[in-house]
Each structure stands twice: as structure tokens, then as C-alpha cells.
């Protein structure tokens, strides 16, 4: 039987020890690094086989499946039939060049996305060399011991060795949406996949609890690998704007073909063109009018934007959210770690009737504990000692002194702060740490953690958590003379006093038991506990977040804080950071009891929500969306995933966040920092503006050329441009100037105006007008110039060469108009976009080639121009620039009179 079959049949039937033995590993210490490397060599990386990518040739050929290419091919055939072989050749070359541009741009956009996906490779916690480490999930191998926690994605197929309230959602494999409770006992051989409760399968997700398992299958040998189901959802690559433009492009193409047909009939019956000239002009018209390069250029702009965002630590998981980001009007943010630094230090502790201050900052245990400014010896303060022991035992964090790095804290920052407190309290507490038996891990839903431990006073359950939760559970309290009646109002006052200073408050309590419990249940803990005391932890706000909140306000974006923390702490921090009015606050319980209509109102009215649980986040998102608000929501825990999925832009924390939250999100913050969200919103606005500017820039090129040809047929004049010349103009502009606006920096007022309405149509009335206006301006100007030159008896080849230059140079000038949609061209710093000058230089070289190189003269029917003749294109370009600037100034006035929306 090969390993493949063994995996399928055996593991769930084996006892744990047997499974460990067969995997030749050690359940406690894991593999050694050396052994793991050997196995990695032997079994390969833990990856599902990638879907076979389309070959490059096929992808290249696909670019020929395009209306423009069809038009070009028909044109090539017609020119060949007419005997214009040079034209045929040029048209074919242009078709190939065009498809190549599309191909390379698409490949570039895909590469950008791929490199970003790579930033998000899932991590897993394993034990190797008797140490707990985090590794890239692809580097896990057979025999590795994997630790599972709520929110993790199972990285390989595991035979479970321990399961503490472990629940795994296996719908990816079994279709069953309800999470399966896991155990460790061996099962009968005929147990179906969905019932193998002692196994955890790759790509399923841990929805609650914790556990440990030995890797028995990786990569394609896993259950998922066998059914060969790709886990990565197909990511949407087309943004709404891209879809709109693509659709628009198609409609325009059909319209142009119809117009070309009508123009042909008109020219044929009502003007006396010879058949050949007319056909060539119609081909020219069709080629001129179709905005073939547009979709590719727009995706390049998005891809460049996504890359820039990744550099700024905002990793966008799907392209459409880049656009949505620019339209966000409410950002709902967590507090801890996102708005605050997550650098926690315990500053105050309180037991009954005594308060202590703790000096020092950070995780290094340098500092003293003092009472009324007098340093105390913890051994002389039994209540304090008991309190600190509770915080220390009921804790998963570690603090170690490293030779090189000094003190290294690992784990949750709140818990790190409490471990540091224990070290500050003295060696005695650290050395005499009682042994832990069972644990109920902390969860944002329950807001406490509990541990059973064997102390010198007998078995105890230690509980630490949100103090108001513990107050509800307590019936007694610890006093100097032992346990006594519970004085709830005393503790409430203490909590308020700490929370009002913006401190995060943690409570401690215990419950004596007859026996050392090896399995804890919430029901056993949630009554009759003895309250011990409190710790007040400082978590300073991030300075940059305060500035970002200010900038959100200027940009018409409301920031809401949705935290699990205490109401008073939330209020104090909110006030320090500029969120809410420092007074109004809603707590989770109130929110829970509201009906949808009331919540819809409250969701807008309140900016600070405290003591919330993840399900409240989901209700809040729904309530905001019911008022058509585009909202972004942050989250880290597994239970935040539904809210992130529902939000218009779900934002997961890169450091603190679980794999499940990251998968449910549109964007991942590599640094967990609120300011990064605001930077991403800025970038989103910049990108959307640049997309619009590019459309506004490109379409008039097509418009002007079409205008020129249609007008000359209508007036019966000589064709101002030959098809090959039109192809040349389109090719050089889409290779150069069309790309420049992708690099345009943000408009100075981009974060000073309100968010754009999401349903704002791309081509609104003003856009349509502007495109038409500039088309007629450049087209009409060029036509007028042609007529003047003809009248002055300039030969036809020279006129056409001047026409080619005029359209291109007018476009170059027009590029400066488009740097801002509504504001003057001088509102942008002139050299802030260097791309413009690079593409302009390339454009000049290309234009000089087509004008002065004899071979190109022959192919494109051009002639060398004298220096004097260059003045026409330059004058016309300058005139276009000035007239469009005047039009913009007038349009802004007219529009601001008629609407409140700024352009
Ligand atoms: P945010 O939602 O803004 O990140 P948060 O981190 O304070 O806020 P939770 O993690 O849900 O929200 O914590 C809620 C409360 O639970 C805290 O105010 C604290 O009192 C308590 N708490 C936090 N971490 C722990 C922990 N590891 N063990 C016990 N109690 C904790």
C-alpha cells in the first residue's frame, strides 16, 4: 500500500500514540529542523498543484479576438484586394503590435497582483526542536506537530493529539456549514470523512477552541488535494469601472461600424469619391474611432495602484475594492492595536481598599510597585500577590531574556503586560508558578479566560477578563481578612476611575474547587466566583492615527470606533483621538436590544461603540448599508469574518488577524495601523481620479480623428489622413501619452472633498460634453488647418504630414489639460508627474522618425517638414490647451451653481 492509500484509510483508526509513532515524530518536541528539512526534500512542499496556466501563445492569440483586430483584418483584406500591399503589411504589423501591447499590459497587471498574493501566504504554528515557531504553511511536512487556534486555517491533514473545545468548519470538504466538534479517540475504519472527528483536514478552518495534531498528509495527498478542489476563490479582476468601460467600448464599436456604413453610403451616392479612396477612408474611420487601448490602460492604472498600496502596507486582495475604497464614507475601526499602539503596560492595580502604582514602560520588567509613593515588597501584600498570581497563571504569554535581543515578549499584548507585572513583582511569583491543568481560552464573545491550577492552597480556577463581566459572575470578594461579602458598587467605582483615564481594565477572580478540573466549561465558571481585583493598563493612542482621523473628517469620512473595551475607556480614548463627541457612546447590550430600524438611526448617530462582540459588528454594517453608506470595517478574530465579508471593504489585520479573517477581507493591513487604511483610501481616490482623467484624455483622440474623416466626406474634401497614418497616430499615442496619467499624483483637494457617490455614472453629462467638445475642437481645428494649407497650395503629402503632427501634438497639449478634471492645469505642480516628460520625449523621437526617415516616409506617406511648418501643429496644440482651460473654468462655475458635487 503506498502512502497515498495509507492516508486515506488508516489514520483515523489509529490511537494517537500509534499515529505519532508511525509518523516517526515526537508529540511534545516535534521534528528536529534537520529531520524536517530531510522530509521536505523527500515529500516536497505542502502545496496543492496549481491549475495549469494557459500557455503564453494562447494568451497572446486571445488578444486577436477583439473587434478592432477584426476591423483591421478586414481592412488588410480590402487593401490587399485593391493592391495597396504596403498598407496591408502596415495594417498587419499594427494588428500584431496592438495585440502585443494588450498582452504585455495584461501580463504586467497580473504579475503585480501575483506578487501581492504572495505577500499573503498563510502561516502556521508548529513545534520543532521543542520550540513553538511560526512557519510558512508550504514548509510543513509529514510528522510536524501543528498547533491549532480559533481562526486558523488547517495547513495540512492532521491526526489530532489534543482538542480543547476544538470546532472545525469543514464546508470546503464536506459541504456541511456547521462546525464539527473534534475529539482525539480512535474511530472505526468505516467512519465517513465528515465524521472523522479525530482528524483535521487541510483548508478547513478552526472556528473555536484549540488543539494539536500530527501532520499525516500534505499537498496533493491531502483530502482536498485528492478531490483537487482549488481553495482560492476565483478572484474578481474586473472592477465596476472596467466593466462599464468595456461595455462602453463595445457599444461604441457597433455604433462606429454603423456610422462607417452610413458614411460609405453617403460618400458613394452623394459625393463623387472613387470607390478606392472612399473605402480607404471608411477603413480609416473605423480604425480611428475604436478606443482599443482603453481597457488595457485602465487595468494597468489599477495594477500600479495596487502595487503602490502594497508598498504602503495595505494589501488589496481583489481589484474592485480599489475603486470602492475611494467611495468609502464610514470607516469602522477596532481600537486596540489599530488606533492604539498595542504597547501595553500595567500602570495601576487595585485590590480591596488598596491601590498600587507600577513604574516602568514596555515589556522589560524594570520598574517598581508602590503604595502611596512607597515601594512595597509584594511578599508582604498577600492580596496583591494573589492578584498578580492569577494574572500570571491565567495567561498564555511568555517573557524571556535573550542574550542578543534583551527581553522578548511573545503572545497577546494585554497578557504580555500582565506577565511583565509578575516579573516586576519578583522572582518568587515567577518561580512558584502553579501548574495549569485545563484552560478556557479568551474570546471576544465571552471576554474572559479561565485556567484550572494546582496551587499550594489546593485546586483553583483562575479567571481574568473584562471586569464588568466578572462582576456579574461574582458573589464574594477577597479582602484582607479572607473572603467577604461582595461590594459591587465599590468595584464599579474603581473600574470607572481607571477607565476614565483611558486605561484598559482587566479584572481577576478565582473559584476554589474540590478537585483539579481537567476540562472547563463556561457554565461551571459563570457563577459564584470570588472577585480579586483590577489592573489598569495603558495603551497609548497612535499619534499618526490621530492625524489620519483628522484627515478623514476633512474628506467627509466618518470614523467610528467599535471596541470590545469598557465604555469609559473607549470614551476617554475616543476623546483623545477625535472620534465622537467625547460624551455619546453606545454599549453592546443596548445595541443588541434595538430593532433594525432603531439601529439604522443609531448607527449613524453614534461614533463610539463599546463592549461590543463580533455579532454586533455585523449588525452595524448592515444598519449602515441600509442607509446606503459605503463602509469599511476592520477585524481580527475568527468571529469578525461575517462582518468583514458583509462590509463594502472588509479590512483584516495582517499581524493580529487570523487566517480566516484575512480570507474574508478585501484588504489586509500589513502593519495593523489605522493610518494605513486612510492612506489606502487616499490612493483609492487618486486611482479613481486617474481612471477618469485617462478616459477623458483618450476618447477625444478617437473623436477628433473620426470627426476629421466624417467631416471631410460630408464636405467632399480630400481625405486628411490615410488609414496607415491613423494607425500610426493611435499606436504612438497609446504607447506613450495614454499611459502618463496613471502616474499622476493625487489632486491637492482629493482628501478635502466628500466621498464620491457610488452609483455615480462614469460618463455623466459633463464627461460626454467634454469628450465631444475636445473632439470637435481638435478635429475641427485640424480640418480648418488642412483647408487653409490646401488653399495655400501646399502639396497633399505635406498637408497630411502636418495633420499627423497636429493631432499628436494637440494630444500632448491636451494631456496637460487632463492632469486635473476640473481645476486649472496649473493647480498641479508642473514636474510632479515625471512620466509625462518621459513619454513626451519618446513621442517626439517617434514623430521625428515618421517625418524624417526616408523608409518611414515611404511606408506612411509622409514627407520631411521644414522648421517653419512645425509652427502649425504647435499653434493648434497651444490653442487647444488654452481653450480647454477656459472651458474648464467656465464649466466649474456652471456646475457648482447647479450641483453641490465638485468635479
Ligand atoms: P478592540 O475590539 O478594539 O480590539 P479589545 O481588544 O479591547 O478591543 P476584546 O479583545 O474583545 O476587545 O477585549 C474586551 C475586553 O476583554 C478587554 O477590555 C479586557 O478587559 C478583556 N481582555 C482582553 N484581552 C484579554 C485576555 N487575553 N484575557 C482576559 N481578558 C482580556
Image (cartoon, rainbow, N blue to C red):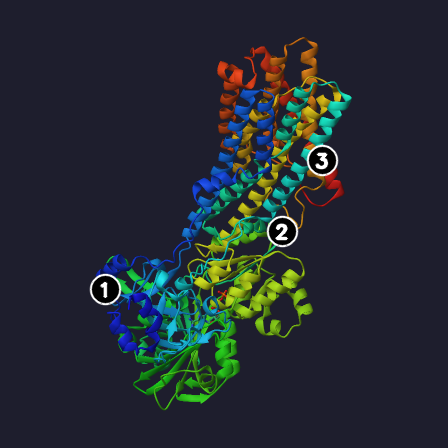
The x and y percentages for residue 168 are 44, 72
What whole-number distance in Å separates the C-alpha atoms at marks 2 and 3?
28 Å
Look at the picture and state if 396 lies above or below 738: below
Q: Considering only order in the chain, which callout, 3 or 2, is on the residue closer to the N terminus?
A: 2
Q: State the residue at coordinates (56%, 12%).
A: 865
| Mark 3 or mark 1, earlier in chain | 1
In what element is the residue under mark 1? Answer: loop
Mark 2 lies within 8 Å of ligand 1 (Cβ measured): no
Where residue 642 appears, as percent x and y from the top left, is 54, 65
Ligand 1 under 8 Å from disc 1 Cβ: no
For disc 1, the marked residue is 32
Callout 3: 10 Å neighbours few (<14), some, many (20+)?
Answer: few
Q: Secondary structure at mark 2?
A: loop
Res. 769 mark: 3
Horizontal and vertical percent for residue 629? 64, 57
| Placement of 436 over or under 331, stated as above or below | below
Residue visible at 25% across and 68% down? 130
**Of the image marks 2 and 1, the number of the one nearer the N terminus:** 1
Judged left or right of residue 726, residue 175 is left
Amino acid at each position: 500500500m503506498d502512502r497515498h492509500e495509507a492516508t486515506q484509510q488508516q489514520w483515523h483508526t489509529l490511537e494517537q500514540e500509534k499515529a505519532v509513532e508511525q509518523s516517526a515524530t515526537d508529540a511534545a518536541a516535534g521534528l528536529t529542523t534537520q529531520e524536517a528539512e530531510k522530509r521536505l526534500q523527500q515529500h516536497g512542499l505542502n502545496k496543492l498543484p496549481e491549475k495549469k496556466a494557459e500557455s503564453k501563445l494562447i494568451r497572446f492569440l486571445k488578444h486577436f479576438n477583439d473587434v478592432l483586430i477584426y476591423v483591421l483584418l478586414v481592412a488588410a483584406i480590402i487593401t490587399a484586394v485593391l493592391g495597396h500591399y504596403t498598407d496591408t503589411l502596415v495594417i498587419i504589423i499594427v494588428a500584431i503590435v496592438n495585440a502585443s501591447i494588450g498582452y504585455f499590459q495584461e501580463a504586467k497587471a497580473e504579475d503585480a497582483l501575483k506578487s501581492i498574493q504572495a505577500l499573503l501566504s498563510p502561516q502556521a504554528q508548529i513545534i520543532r526542536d521543542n520550540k513553538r515557531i511560526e512557519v510558512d504553511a508550504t514548509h510543513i511536512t509529514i510528522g510536524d506537530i501543528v498547533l491549532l487556534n480559533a481562526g486558523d486555517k488547517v495547513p495540512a491533514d492532521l491526526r489530532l493529539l489534543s482538542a480543547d473545545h476544538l470546532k472545525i468548519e469543514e464546508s470546503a470538504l464536506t459541504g456541511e456549514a456547521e462546525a464539527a466538534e473534534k475529539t482525539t479517540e480512535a474511530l472505526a475504519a468505516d467512519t465517513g470523512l465528515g465524521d472523522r472527528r479525530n482528524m483535521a483536514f487541510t483548508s478547513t478552518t478552526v472556528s473555536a477552541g484549540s488543539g494539536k495534531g500530527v501532520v499525516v498528509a500534505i499537498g496533493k495527498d491531502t483530502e482536498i488535494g485528492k478531490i483537487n478542489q482549488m481553495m482560492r476563490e476565483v478572484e474578481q479582476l474586473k472592477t465596476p469601472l472596467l466593466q462599464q468601460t468595456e461595455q462602453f467600448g463595445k457599444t461604441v464599436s457597433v455604433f462606429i461600424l454603423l456610422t462607417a456604413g452610413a458614411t460609405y453610403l453617403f460618400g458613394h451616392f452623394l459625393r463623387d469619391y472613387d470607390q478606392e479612396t472612399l473605402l480607404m477612408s471608411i477603413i480609416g474611420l473605423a480604425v480611428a474611432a475604436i478606443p482599443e487601448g482603453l481597457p488595457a490602460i485602465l487595468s494597468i492604472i489599477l495594477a500600479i495602484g495596487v502595487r503602490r498600496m502594497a508598498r504602503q502596507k495595505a494589501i488589496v486582495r481583489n481589484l474592485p475594492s480599489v475603486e470602492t475604497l475611494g467611495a468609502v464614507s464610514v470607516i469602522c475601526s477596532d481600537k486596540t492595536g489599530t488606533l492604539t499602539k498595542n504597547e501595553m503596560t500595567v500602570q495601576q492595580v487595585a485590590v480591596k481598599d488598596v491601590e498600587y502604582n507600577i513604574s516602568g514602560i514596555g515589556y522589560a520588567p524594570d520598574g517598581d510597585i508602590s503604595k502611596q509613593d512607597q515601594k512595597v515588597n509584594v511578599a508582604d501584600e498577600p492580596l496583591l500577590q494573589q492578584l498578580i498570581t492569577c494574572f500570571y497563571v491565567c495567561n498564555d504569554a511568555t517573557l524571556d531574556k535573550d542574550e542578543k535581543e534583551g527581553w522578548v515578549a511573545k503572545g497577546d499584548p494585554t497578557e504580555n503586560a500582565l506577565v511583565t507585572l509578575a516579573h516586576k513583582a519578583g522572582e518568587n511569583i515567577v518561580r512558584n508558578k502553579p501548574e495549569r491543568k485545563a484552560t478556557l481560552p479568551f474570546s471576544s464573545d465571552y471576554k474572559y479566560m479561565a485556567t484550572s491550577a494546582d496551587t499550594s492552597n489546593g485546586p483553583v480556577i483562575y479567571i481574568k477578563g473584562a471586569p464588568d463581566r466578572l462582576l456579574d459572575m461574582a458573589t464574594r470578594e477577597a479582602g484582607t481578612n479572607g473572603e467577604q461579602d461582595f461590594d459591587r458598587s465599590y468595584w464599579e467605582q474603581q473600574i470607572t476611575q481607571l477607565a476614565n483615564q483611558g486605561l484598559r481594565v482587566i479584572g481577576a477572580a478565582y473559584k476554589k474547587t474540590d478537585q483539579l478540573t481537567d476540562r472547563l466549561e463556561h457554565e461551571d465558571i459563570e457563577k459564584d466566583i470570588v472577585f480579586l481585583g483590577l489592573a489598569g493598563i495603558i495603551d497609548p493612542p497612535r499619534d499618526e492615527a490621530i492625524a489620519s482621523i483628522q484627515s478623514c473628517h476633512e474628506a467627509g469620512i466618518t470614523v467610528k470606533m467599535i471596541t470590545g473595551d469598557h465604555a469609559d475607556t473607549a470614551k476617554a480614548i475616543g476623546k483623545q483621538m477625535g472620534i465622537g463627541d467625547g460624551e455619546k457612546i453606545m454599549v453592546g447590550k443596548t445595541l443588541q436590544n434595538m430593532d433594525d430600524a432603531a439601529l439604522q438611526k443609531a448607527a449613524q448617530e453614534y461614533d463610539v461603540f463599546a463592549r461590543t462582540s463580533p455579532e454586533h459588528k455585523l449588525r452595524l454594517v448592515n444598519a449602515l448599508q441600509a442607509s446606503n453608506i459605503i463602509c469599511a470595517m476592520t477585524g481580527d478574530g475568527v468571529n469578525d469574518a461575517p462582518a468583514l465579508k458583509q462590509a463594502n471593504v472588509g479590512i483584516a489585520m495582517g499581524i493580529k488577524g487570523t487566517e480566516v479573517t484575512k480570507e474574508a477581507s478585501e484588504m489586509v493591513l500589513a502593519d495593523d495601523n489605522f493610518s494605513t487604511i486612510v492612506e489606502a483610501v487616499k490612493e483609492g481616490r487618486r486611482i479613481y481620479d486617474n481612471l477618469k482623467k485617462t478616459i477623458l484624455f483618450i476618447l477625444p483622440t478617437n473623436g477628433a480623428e473620426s470627426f476629421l474623416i466624417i467631416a471631410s466626406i460630408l464636405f467632399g474634401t480630400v481625405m486628411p489622413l490615410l488609414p496607415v497614418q491613423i494607425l500610426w497616430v493611435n499606436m504612438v499615442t497609446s504607447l506613450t501619452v495614454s499611459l502618463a496619467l496613471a502616474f499622476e499624483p493625487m489632486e491637492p483637494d482629493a482628501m478635502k472633498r466628500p466621498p464620491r457617490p457610488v452609483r455615480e455614472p462614469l460618463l455623466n453629462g459633463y464627461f460626454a460634453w467634454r469628450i465631444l467638445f475636445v473632439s470637435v475642437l481638435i478635429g475641427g481645428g485640424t480640418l480648418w488647418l488642412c483647408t487653409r494649407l490646401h488653399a495655400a497650395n501646399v502639396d497633399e503629402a505635406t498637408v497630411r504630414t502636418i495633420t499627423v503632427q497636429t493631432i499628436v501634438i494637440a494630444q500632448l497639449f491636451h494631456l496637460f489639460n487632463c492632469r486635473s478634471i476640473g481645476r486649472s492645469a496649473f493647480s498641479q505642480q508642473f514636474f510632479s508627474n515625471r512620466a509625462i516628460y518621459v513619454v513626451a520625449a519618446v513621442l517626439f523621437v517617434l514623430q521625428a522618425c515618421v517625418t524624417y526617415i526616408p523608409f518611414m516616409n515611404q511606408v506612411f506617406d509622409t514627407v520631411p517638414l521644414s522648421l517653419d511648418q512645425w509652427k502649425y501643429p504647435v499653434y493648434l496644440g497651444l490653442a487647444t490647451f488654452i481653450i480647454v482651460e477656459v472651458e474648464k473654468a467656465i464649466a466649474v462655475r456652471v456646475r457648482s451653481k447647479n450641483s453641490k458635487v465638485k468635479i
